[in-house]
Image (tube, rainbow, N blue to C red):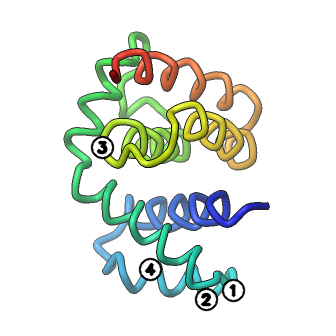
């Protein structure tokens, strides 16, 4: 498993915990990084993703709502919603990773943490998001 994949997985775990708590994001990141024995590189990229998603959450949710015809954000599985936020952050704001790479990574995360159907769901939504990015 590559470092960026590990970082996205770490970011997913941190954001999942933060979704239901008022915990300090940096403390949660340190905790989960320690649990998974994350390297400094993995922790740095995960931290960037976590901070980026938190800082841009309203914008990310607006993009997701626009791209999702049949599902409201509140109806999406929590894991799927967080995976989508991370990918939309990478595709629309950070833009250091090709959209296809962000989509493929997100599909793998969704399959691992939510199931095969989630992979298809994530792929469909992110395909629409990527089509709107120039």
Quarter holding the N terminus is: bottom right
Mark 2 or 3: in front is: 3
Which residue is disc 4 drawn over? 28
Give me the C-alpha separation between circle 4 and circle 2: 10 Å
Residue at image position (33%, 54%) is 53
Give me the C-alpha separation between circle 3 and circle 4: 23 Å
Relative vertical location of residue 119 with respect to residue 16 in this rendering, above or below: above
Q: Residue 112: horizontal and vertical position, in percent?
A: 75, 47
Relative vertical location of residue 26 with respect to residue 55 in this rendering, above or below: below
- Among numbered discs 3 and 4, the one appearing first in the sequence: 4
- Among numbered discs 1 and 3, the one appearing first in the sequence: 1
Relative vertical location of residue 124 with respect to residue 93 in this rendering, above or below: above
Q: Residue 36: horizontal and vertical position, in percent?
A: 69, 80
**In the image, which disc is placed on residue 37?**
1
Q: Quadrant of residue 71?
A: top left
Left or right of 80 on screen, residue 95: left
Residue at image position (69%, 49%) is 113
Q: Residue 128: horizontal and vertical position, in percent?
A: 44, 16
User: Does the CB distance between marks 2 and 1 fall below 8 Å?
Assistant: yes
């Amino acid at each position: 498993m590559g470092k960026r994949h590990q970082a996205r997985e770490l970011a997913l775990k941190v954001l999942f915990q933060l979704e239901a708590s008022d915990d300090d994001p940096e403390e949660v990141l340190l905790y989960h990084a320690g649990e998974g024995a994350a390297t400094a590189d993995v922790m740095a990229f995960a931290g960037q993703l976590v901070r980026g998603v938190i800082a841009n959450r309203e914008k990310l949710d607006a993009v997701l709502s626009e791209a999702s015809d049949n599902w409201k954000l509140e109806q999406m599985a929590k894991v799927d919603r967080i995976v989508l936020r991370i990918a939309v952050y990478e595709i629309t704001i950070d833009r250091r990773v090709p959209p296809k790479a962000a989509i493929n990574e997100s599909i793998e995360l969704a399959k691992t943490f939510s199931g095969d159907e989630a992979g298809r769901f994530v792929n469909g939504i992110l395909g629409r998001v990527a089509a709107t990015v120039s």
